[in-house]
Image: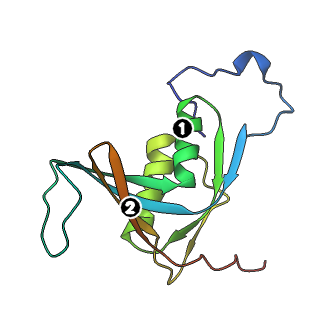
Amino acid sequence: MSTGMPGIDPLDGLRAPQDPDCDVFLTGTVFLDIIFTGLDSAPVRGTESWARGMGSSPGGVANMATALARLGLHTSLAAAFGDDHYGEYCWDALEQGEGIDLSMSHTVRGWHSPVTVSMAYEGERTMVSHGHEAPPPAAP
């Protein structure tokens, strides 16, 4: 699980051996966020717009999980991940990149990861999302 800054645990002096493994447990939908920046204006219908910048990251509930992990809280996330490249990217970014515990998460066979494309211009943003509700977890 994440400890935020290497070697820094903001709750170290408060922790006891009987405490749970995580400080924060989250559940929700993880999206792949693709963000275009540096647009001069909103895209005009029927034309192609070029952005000066672009980024991608796990979004949705992953935004909160990432923020909490970066603050040094031991963070655990239970979420469904698509069995596609987007789901794999989000899983790796959260688990390996941010140190978030995904032991309660699972990959859903045949499910496509939700995606949000965000376009930032003139201090505003416009978003387009696509996704289907994740199927309920299989009964044990």
* Residue visible at 63% across and 80% down in the picture: 135
| Residue 21 position within the rendered picture, expressed as x and y whole percent measured from the top left | 74, 40
The structure residue drawn at horizontal position 43% and vertical position 50%, both measured from the top left corner, is 93
Residue corresponding to mark 1 = 67
Position of the N terminus, as image quadrant, is top right
Q: Earlier in the sequence, mark 1 or mark 2?
A: 1
Q: Looking at the picture, how far across and down is residue 87, in whole percent?
A: 45, 66
Q: Is residue 22 visible?
A: no
Residue 27, visible in the rendered structure: yes
* Residue 107, percent from left and from top: 55, 71
Q: Residues within 10 Å of mark 1 (few under 14, many from 20)?
A: some
Neighbour tally class for label 2: few under 14, some 14-19, many 20 plus, Cα within 10 Å: few
Report the residue marked by disc 2: 127
In the image, residue 76 sits, relative to residue 20, either above or below, namely below
Q: Is residue 111 above or below residue 116?
A: below
Label 1–label 2 contact, CB within 8 A: no
Residue 15, located in which quarter of the rendered image? top right
- Judged left or right of residue 29, residue 118 is left
Q: Amino acid at mark 2?
A: Met
Asked if residue 114 lies left or right of residue 65, the reply is left
Mark 1 and mark 2: Cα distance apart in space: 21 Å
The residue that appears at 47% across and 62% down in the rendered structure is: 31
Quadrant location of residue 102? bottom right
- Name the residue type under label 1: Ala
Label 1 residue SS: helix
Q: Is residue 71 left or right of residue 32?
A: right
Quadrant, the C terminus: bottom right
